[in-house]
Amino acid sequence: MYHSWLSPDIVVGPAGAKGVGLFATRVFERGEIVTGFGGHVLSTSDFHQLPEHRQTHSLQIAENLFMVAPITEEPADMFNHSCEPNLGIHGSVMLVTMRPVAQGEELTFDYAMCDADGYDEFDCHCATSRCRNKVTSSDWMDPELQARYRGYFSAYLAQRIETLRLSPTVDSLM
C-alpha cells in the first residue's frame, strides 16, 4: 500500500532527459485534484539528517516540517519540476490542475510553490520558455512568480508571501 494517493488516470512514463515522469491518460479540467501526498512528518533537524536521496522525495509542509516519502519509491514521487507547470499546490499536500491538461501531457509543478529550504536546489533543464535555469529556495520570493502562482502556493508559503507583502523588510523572513 502506498502512502500517497494518485489519480488512477495518471501513468508513469519516459520523460526524456528527466528520466521518468507522470502523464495524463485522459483530459483533466482546471481544478482537479491529481494527488494527495502522504508520508512521515519530520522536523527540519531530523530531515537534514536524512541521506540526500531521501530528501529529494519530500515536501516542505510548514516552516519547520517536512513530509518525507517512505523508503520505497512510489509513483506520486515522480512529478517533475517545470518552470511552466500545469499543476499547483492545494493546501499543503495536494496537487491540482492549474489549467486544462491534455491526454498524454506530462504533469509537472514548480517546486518553488512549496520549498523554501535549500535541500533541493538544482540546475533546471525543463526547456520551457520561462525556464529559470536554476531552482532555488528563494524562488518563491520572486514577485512575478507570486503573481503567476497566486492561489497555488502551499499554505505555509502563501502565509510567508502575505507576511512579506505586509512587511517593510525582507530580512525578517530569511
Image (cartoon, helix red, strand yellow):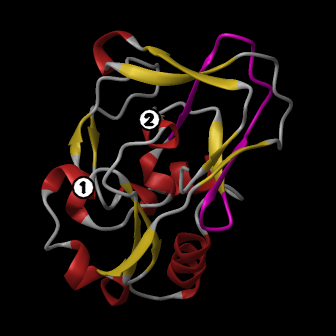
Q: Is residue 43 left or right of residue 90?
A: left
Q: Is residue 95 positioned above or below 156 on the image?
A: above
Query: Which residues lie in the magenta part?
Result: 90-109
Furthest residue in direction front, as rendered: 1
Q: Residue at x 46, y 19 (%)?
A: 129
Quarter where residue 43 is shown: bottom left
Answer with left or right where residue 91 lies relative to residue 15: right
Q: Which residue is mark 1?
A: 54
State which quadrant residue 99 falls in: top right
Q: Answer whether residue 91 is magenta in the image.
A: yes
Determine the secondary structure under disc 2: helix
In the depicted structure, whether residue 16 falls above or below residue 77: above
Q: Which residue is mark 2?
A: 78
User: Marks 1 and 2: CB-CB under 8 Å?
Assistant: no
Q: Quadrant of the C terminus?
A: bottom left
Residue 39 x, y percent position in the rendering: 47, 64
Residue type of the residue flagged with mark 1: Arg
Q: Which mark is residue 120?
A: none
Indicate the secondary structure of the residue bearing disc 1.
helix
Q: Position of residue 15 (x, y in %)?
A: 41, 14
Q: Nearer the viewer, residue 160 or 59?
A: 59
